[in-house]
Image (tube, helix red, strand yellow):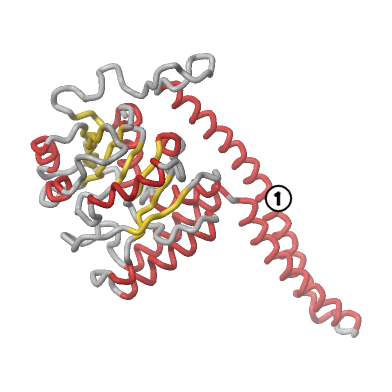
């Protein structure tokens, strides 16, 4: 059983070594632990700190591509180097490294494929009142959209089994945290959470520049994920609201008409007809989007099988391979400098 712990980094030279020192070196049930850094276009000595500390892999981006791109690049490289479990944590040491053992236990016990670390948000004195409320509201919306019971959806402290990692897809550039939960819920994956501790803040969050910016980006991410994975439900709801409004206005017109006052309410009849047409068209759009969503599901299944072929988990005829596979031709380690261009991952 091989665990790879990945850390996305952007100008983290001051905090990275602190976070690395907190990571576990041994966990019962895990044969091998390796460490992976995603250098997301840092302009400081992040990479130098990582190499001197002794990380096994570094994904190097020439420019900053964002948290979502870095997360996917790390997942891909970890899979190529034989990871059975992949843990994602932060370079600012927000999460307690010792809790990684707790985080992966549901995967080791084969109870879940994805485990999210639940932070004690209510007890965190460094979170403002507004931020606590926004975190709770965002998690509530994600639970509704994904049909899961994850209490801390924005948490970046999470573990993936090999199977779950091969199914991860992220389409937005802001963050992977919200979309991947909606995706997991839609794909009926086993997902759970465990309570974890947090460390004192070493720096301000770089994802939350302002309350408005955080709300806007989070809501857009959730909306896009819901439209992508549950389009029929969304468009049916919108179409029903529009059509129901049209029907109610139409009934109002008919009442006036039979009372002999219909001539003065022609505009109501026009509005009613427009709303009913808009509602019908919205429902048809939902059907089309649902067909596209079904095709996306087929493409995701094909992608999953292609990844299994690439990782040596299937032979060319689609049968389970005899060997475990999952390691690149150059073995478990990268070349001597331990750095790979992220654009080639």
287 left or right, relative to 320: right
Residue at label 1? 284
333, 320: nearer the viewer: 320
284 left or right, relative to 5: right
Name the spot of residue 26 as percent of width and height, x first.
22, 40
Residue positioned 22% across, 28% down in the render = 340
Residue 236, compared with residue 130, is above or below; it is above
Name the spot of residue 129 as percent of width and height, x first.
32, 75
261, 22: nearer the viewer: 22
198 left or right, relative to 223: left
94 left or right, relative to 53: right
Q: Quadrant of the N terminus?
A: top left
Secondary structure under tag 1 reads: helix
Residue positioned 62% across, 39% down in the render = 294
Q: Quadrant of residue 323?
A: top left
59, 223: nearer the viewer: 59
């Amino acid at each position: 059983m091989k665990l790879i712990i990945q850390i996305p980094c952007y100008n983290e030279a001051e905090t990275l070594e602190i976070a690395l020192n907190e990571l576990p070196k041994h966990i019962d049930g895990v044969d091998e632990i390796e460490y992976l850094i995603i250098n997301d276009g840092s302009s400081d000595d992040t990479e130098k700190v990582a190499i001197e500390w002794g990380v096994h892999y570094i994904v190097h981006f020439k420019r900053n591509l964002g948290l979502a791109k870095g997360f996917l690049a790390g997942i891909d490289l970890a899979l190529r180097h034989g990871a059975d479990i992949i843990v994602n944590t932060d370079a600012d040491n927000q999460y307690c490294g010792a809790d990684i053992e707790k985080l992966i236990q549901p995967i080791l016990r084969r109870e879940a494929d994805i485990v999210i670390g639940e932070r004690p948000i209510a007890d965190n004195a460094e979170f403002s009142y507004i931020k606590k409320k926004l975190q709770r509201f965002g998690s509530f919306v994600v639970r509704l959209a994904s049909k899961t019971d994850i209490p801390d959806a924005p948490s970046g402290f999470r573990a993936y089994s090999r199977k779950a990692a091969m199914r991860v897809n992220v389409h937005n550039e802001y963050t992977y945290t919200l979309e991947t939960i909606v995706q997991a819920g839609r794909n009926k994956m086993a997902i759970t959470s465990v309570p974890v501790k947090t460390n004192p803040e070493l720096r301000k969050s770089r994802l939350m520049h302002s309350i408005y910016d955080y709300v806007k980006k989070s809501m857009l991410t959730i909306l896009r994920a819901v439209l992508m994975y549950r389009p029929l439900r969304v468009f049916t709801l919108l179409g029903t609201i529009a059509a129901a409004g049209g029907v109610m206005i139409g009934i109002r017109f008919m009442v006036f008409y039979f009372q002999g006052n219909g001539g003065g309410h022609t505009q109501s009849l026009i509005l009613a007809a427009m709303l009913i047409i808009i509602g019908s068209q919205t429902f048809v759009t939902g059907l089309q989007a649902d067909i596209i969503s079904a095709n996306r599901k087929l493409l995701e299944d094909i992608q999953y099988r292609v990844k299994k072929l690439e990782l040596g988990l299937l032979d060319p005829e689609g049968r389970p391979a005899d060997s475990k596979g999952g390691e690149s031709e150059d073995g478990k380690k990268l070349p001597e400098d331990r750095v790979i261009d992220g654009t080639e991952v």
